[in-house]
Amino acid sequence: MPAKRFLIDANLLVLFVVGRTDRRLIAKHRRLRQFSVEDYDRLVGMVGFVEEVVVTPNTLTETSNLLAQHNEPERSRFFDELRHVIENSHEITVASVDACRNRAFRRLGIADAAVLELVSATTPVLTVDLDLFIAASRKDPHAAVNFRHLP
């Protein structure tokens, strides 16, 4: 049974927010050099396929910090769009004390450790981060989707 919801990593959330703001800005945002407009379109298709997008406060903070690395006036537009994404997502908080006890914490950091506390076959993480993908797949082979391997 395909997942009805995805937990989306910070890199893809940045792509989603910037693309929703203005697709032309994908090529201009320095944190999105690895992505194209076609990647954004694929991401939109994946998000449209599920009933719910799951985020964590840690992932949203990382996304916010990455979006802030762009100049005005686009930065304000990004934050307006991020607000919309937040309002239409399902946010789940993982206590930092729980995340830091995850085996991957020392290697991946608090944000990814929190993600690993939540992922499962019914809530896989959609990611471009190979280390996060591998860690989630070790937890459950169906708990991660590598965005780079999508058609």
Image (cartoon, grey):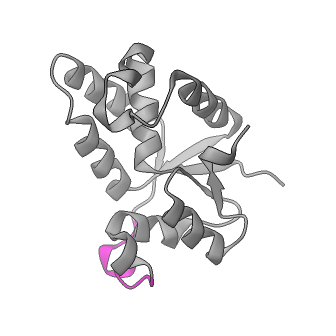
Instruction: Determine the image quadrant of residue 87.
Output: top left
The kind of secondary structure the magenta stretch mainly shows is: loop
Residue 101 in magenta stretch:
yes
Q: Which residues are magenta?
A: 94-103
Choose between 5 and 116: the one closer to the eye: 116
Residue visible at 33% across and 69% down in the picture: 110
134 left or right of 108 in image: right
Figure quadrant of the N terminus: bottom right
What x and y, as percent, mark residue 11?
42, 45
The reply, left or right, for residue 58 in relation to residue 73 is right
> How many numbered tags mark residues here?
0
Residue drawn at x 34%, y 32% as measured from the top left:
82
Residue most toward the front? Answer: 34
- Residue 16 percent across, percent down from the top left: 46, 32
- Would residue 55 be counted in the magenta stretch? no
Residue 54 in the image: x percent, y percent?
52, 50
